[in-house]
Amino acid sequence: METALRDKHILLGVTGSIAAYKSVLILRELIQAGARVTVVMTSSARQFITPLTFQVLSRRPVYTSLFDPSDEIRHLTLAERADLILIAPATANIIGKIANGIADDLLTTLVLAGRAPLVIAPAMDGDMWTHPVLQRNLSVLDGLGVRVVPPEEGPLASGKEGMGRLASEEKILSAVQNRLKRNEDFKGETVLMTAGPTQEPVDPVRYLTNRSSGKMGYALARAAQGRGARVLLISGPTSLPCPVGVERVQVRTAEEMRDAVLRSLPEATVLIMAAAVADYRPRRSADRKLKKGLEPVLLELEPTPDILSEVRLQRGRRFHVGFAAETEDLENRARAKLEQKGLDLIVANDVTQEGAGFDLDTNIVTLMDAYGETTALPKLSKAETAERILDAIVKLKTRPRTNDRIIR
Ligand code: CTP
């Protein structure tokens, strides 16, 4: 059977959790799928299971220590050779270390030295899982492009019920397969992305803006970069850090965003407009702070340039993606925007739904394409939503522009 795992070098990190025995089953599945697996154990993992078990099943040496005089640069060669690093189970401790760049044993050193994609499957007690420090560390990892396979709910080793059980082998394997499949499929593409809100000044201290946090756009930028694209990110004001390897230009107003898009457009093979661009701006922005009075104030607004509509005619073979944040009649409105703006794909979300929209780490979107197809995605992390959007772009880009295309 052909799988994304065939002949791939997987580094399987096992850490000290009661779920460490399940790593044996994961190892077996990886090997059955054709992968070459090298196991690295932390010292606490060895309290739960012996290296011999992994050695017999993987038919390779199992590595446990950074300080083995027989091969001093082993961590570098192991890290360089890996196509993917999987840590399952991953304890709260190792998550904290990776999120903070601590490399005090072989496994954490490999993670820091390696550039292969990292997938982690956490397992821990429910109270640890919900602890704000752990959740903060997970969002740091998410921001670095680490794929987290969330734990499941059920009985825990402590005797309590809750979140924290290691995800099923099936889920872990499919996360690994997906991560490998998606590796490098954007190589050669230059993705021009916009993200975040815009701010339209009223006076030197006030502005009009919207609730966009930029999280969805940044997740897309990170995912496209991870899949081999050159990513040019034009960002409205947000507090999000620029993803590693992404070229960012920061802008404030719709006008500045439009100018930055036009400047970079000739280089782009894909344009993704995830920004929530203000539709109106004050006709005049005061030079000095407006003073308070007792009379009502009328603010005259004028439309901003519609960036996607403006670049429609310069599209050529470039792939254009838009977003539609709606509060009612989602599909009809999104499809109308797809047509008006001449898009290849539109990502629509109903921002009134729980788990979708502003400043959350999850989203619920529907993808509508220029061939009339509609795919509703379930509630997913913004990182996974980003991957699914990129999957759809890859699929559509290779489809010939035949007569069944509705948008021309
Ligand atoms: N967009 C744009 N330029 C604007 C406004 C929006 O390029 N001035 C892009 C957005 O980045 C998004 C898509 O157009 O990809 C749809 O944005 P949205 O705000 O949902 O739609 P509008 O066309 O502004 O319509 P409305 O606000 O009335 O829903």
Image (tube, grey):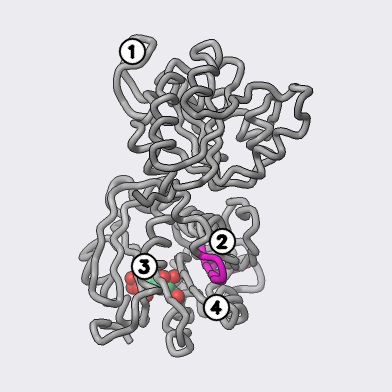
Q: Amino acid at mark 4?
A: Arg
Residue 329 seen by the camera: yes
The relative height of residue 367 versus residue 313 in the rendered view (above or below) is above
Residue 127 seen by the camera: no
- Disc 4 or disc 3, which is closer to the eye? 3
* Few, some or many residues within 10 Å of mark 4 (<14, 14–19, 20+): many
The reply to whether the C-beta atoms of the residues labelled 1 and 2 are less than 8 Å apart is no
Does mark 4's beta carbon lie closer than 8 Å to ligand 1?
yes
Q: CA distance from mark 3 to mark 2?
A: 16 Å
Q: Amino acid at mark 2?
A: Gly
The relative height of residue 216 versus residue 295 in the rendered view (above or below) is above
Q: Which residue is mark 1?
A: 160
- Disc 1 or disc 2, which is closer to the eye? 2
- Disc 3 or disc 1, which is closer to the eye? 3
x then y, percent, for residue 333: 25, 71
Q: Nearer the viewer, residue 291 or 366?
A: 366
Q: Which residue is mark 3?
A: 395
Q: Which residues are magenta?
A: 186-204
The relative height of residue 24 versus residue 279 in the rendered view (above or below) is above
Query: Secondary structure beneath disc 2?
Result: loop
Q: CA distance from mark 4 to mark 1?
A: 54 Å
Q: Which residue is mark 4?
A: 258
State the residue at coordinates (30%, 83%). 407
State the residue at coordinates (34%, 29%). 152
State the residue at coordinates (57%, 55%). 238
